[in-house]
Image (cartoon, helix red, strand yellow):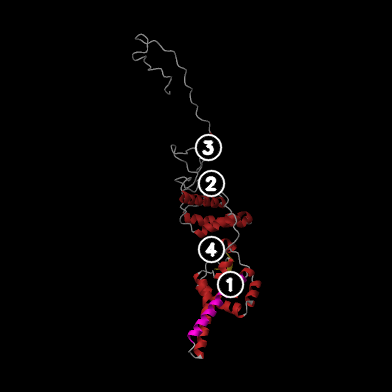
C-alpha cells in the first residue's frame, strides 16, 4: 500500500524546478553568503592582527568552512529546505518521497555544493542538472533530494466524482476514524484517475484499496457492490462527516449526511428527498399536492327554540350559530 501512495499520490504531485530558476536562487544565496563571509573575515582579521601567520591561516580556513559550507547546511536544516534564494524564487528542497529534508540531507548537499558550485563556478552543477531528468545536481543525487516548485499557478481543485444516488446512506454506520490519511489520499488519487487507467489495472487497484479500507473499518464490502462504487461512497461519507464537524448546519445529526431523515416536527422536515439503505428516491414532500381543506358550510337558518324564539336564553342545543363546523 505504501508503494501505491508514494507512486501515485506524492511523486506525481511534485513539480521539479527548472535550471533558470535554480540558477537564480543559487546566485542570490551566493551573494548573501559571500557578503557575510567577507564581512566576518575583515572583522576577524582586524581583531586577530597580532597573531602569527599560522594562527591567521587556521582562522581563515575555519571561517571558510563554517560560513561557506556550514551556513547553507544550517539554513536548509532549520528552514526545511528553503534558503533565501529559494524563498525568493518559490522553490524548496524535499526528499524524493516528498517529505522535508533533515540534517544529513542538507550536509551532503552543502558539502558537494561547495565543490560543484563554488569551486567550479557552477559548471559541474549545470551539466548534471541538464543531464538529469528532474534537473538534479550531484548533491541532490547523493542526498536523495529534489528541488521542487512551491508557487504554482492556482488552479481550480478537481472534485472527486460523486457516488451513485442509491449508495447514499449505506455507509452511515461505518467507523472511519481508524482509516489512515495515507489510505484516504490513495483512494482520492485513484478516484480522480480511474477514467485514465486500464480497466483491468483499475479494477485490481480498486479491489486492493477497498479491501484495505474494509480492514480498517471492520465491515466487509457489501456483496455485489463494485469496489469503485464502494470507494466513492465511503469518500462521500467521510466528506459529509467532515462538513458536519466544520459547519454544523445542513447535515443530518445521526448519519453525518444530508440524506438523514428529519424528525416529523423538525423545521424543514419534508423539504428534501428521503434516502437510506434499501429505500428509493422519492419526490420532495413540498412538491406534493397540499391537503384538501373542506370549505366552510353556508350558515343554516335559525331554528325556533323550545322556549319560544328570540336570541335570549341559552339558544338551541347546538350552541350559538358561528358558522364553525367541528371536524369529523
> Residue at label 2?
167
Q: Viewer-proximal residue, 91 or 16?
A: 91
Q: Which residue is mark 4?
A: 2
Q: Nearer the viewer, mark 3 or mark 2?
A: 3
Distance (Cα) linking label 4 and label 1: 38 Å
Instruction: Please report the residue visible at 54 percent of the width from the left and 52 percent of the height from the top.
Output: 231
Res. 284 mark: 3
Q: Residues within 10 Å of mark 2 (few under 14, many from 20)?
A: many
Which secondary structure class fits the magenta region best? helix
Residue found at x 56% / y 50%: 229
Between the residue at mark 2 and the residue at mark 1, the CA separation in whole angstroms equals 56 Å
Residue 328, which numbered label?
none
Residue, disc 1: 28
Q: Earlier in the sequence, mark 3 or mark 2?
A: 2
Q: CA distance from mark 3 to mark 2?
A: 19 Å
User: Which label lies toward us, 3 or 1?
Assistant: 1
Res 9 quadrant in image: bottom right
| Sooner in the amino-acid sequence: mark 4 or mark 2 | 4
Q: Are marks 3 and 1 in contact (CB under 8 Å)?
A: no
Q: Which contiguous range is marked in magenta?
A: 22-48
Q: Nearer the viewer, residue 103 or 41?
A: 41
Which type of secondary structure does the marked residue at label 3 adopt?
A: loop
Q: Secondary structure at mark 4?
A: helix
**Residue 164, image x, y percentages:** 56, 46
Disc 4 from disc 2: Cα separation: 29 Å
Judge the density around disc 3: few (<14), some (14-19), many (≥20) Cα neighbours within 10 Å: few
Relative height, residue 130 to residue 63 (above, below): above
Q: Which one is closest to the eye, mark 4 or mark 1?
A: 1
Judge whether residue 21 can be spotted in this image.
Answer: yes
Check if residue 30 falls in the magenta segment: yes
Quadrant in which the C terminus appears: top left
Evaluate if marks 3 and 4 touch, with contact meaning CB atoms under 8 Å apart. no
Amino acid at each position: 500500500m505504501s508503494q501505491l501512495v508514494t507512486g501515485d499520490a506524492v511523486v506525481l504531485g511534485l513539480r521539479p524546478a527548472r535550471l533558470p530558476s535554480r540558477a537564480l536562487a543559487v546566485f542570490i544565496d551566493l551573494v548573501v553568503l559571500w557578503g557575510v563571509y567577507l564581512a566576518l573575515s575583515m572583522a576577524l582579521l582586524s581583531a586577530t592582527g597580532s597573531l602569527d601567520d599560522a594562527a591567521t591561516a587556521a582562522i581563515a580556513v575555519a571561517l571558510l568552512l563554517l560560513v561557506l559550507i556550514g551556513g547553507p547546511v544550517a539554513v536548509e536544516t532549520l528552514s526545511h529546505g528553503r534558503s533565501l534564494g529559494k524563498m525568493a524564487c518559490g522553490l524548496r528542497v524535499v526528499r524524493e518521497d516528498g517529505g522535508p529534508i533533515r540534517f544529513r540531507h542538507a550536509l551532503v548537499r552543502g558539502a558537494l555544493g561547495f565543490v560543484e558550485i563554488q569551486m567550479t563556478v557552477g559548471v559541474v552543477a549545470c551539466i548534471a542538472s541538464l543531464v538529469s531528468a528532474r534537473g538534479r545536481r550531484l548533491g541532490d543525487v547523493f542526498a536523495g533530494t529534489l528541488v521542487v516548485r512551491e508557487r504554482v499557478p492556482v488552479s481550480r481543485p478537481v472534485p472527486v466524482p460523486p457516488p451513485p444516488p442509491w449508495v447514499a446512506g449505506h455507509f452511515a454506520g461505518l467507523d472511519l476514524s481508524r482509516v489512515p490519511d495515507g489510505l484516504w489520499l490513495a483512494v482520492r488519487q485513484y478516484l480522480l484517475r480511474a477514467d485514465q487507467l486500464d480497466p483491468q489495472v483499475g479494477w485490481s487497484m480498486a479491489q486492493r484499496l477497498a479491501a484495505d479500507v474494509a480492514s480498517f473499518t471492520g465491515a466487509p464490502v457489501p456483496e455485489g457492490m463494485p469496489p469503485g462504487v464502494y470507494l466513492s461512497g465511503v469518500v462521500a461519507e467521510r466528506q459529509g462527516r467532515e462538513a458536519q464537524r466544520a459547519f454544523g448546519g445542513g447535515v443530518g445529526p445521526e448519519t453525518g449526511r444530508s440524506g438523514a431523515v428529519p424528525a416529523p416536527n423538525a423545521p424543514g422536515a419534508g423539504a428534501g428527498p428521503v434516502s437510506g439503505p434499501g429505500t428509493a428516491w422519492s419526490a420532495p414532500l413540498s412538491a406534493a399536492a397540499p391537503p384538501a381543506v373542506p370549505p366552510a358550510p353556508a350558515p343554516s337558518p335559525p331554528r325556533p327554540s323550545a322556549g319560544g324564539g328570540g336570541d335570549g336564553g341559552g339558544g338551541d342545543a347546538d350552541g350559538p350559530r358561528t358558522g364553525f363546523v367541528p371536524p369529523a
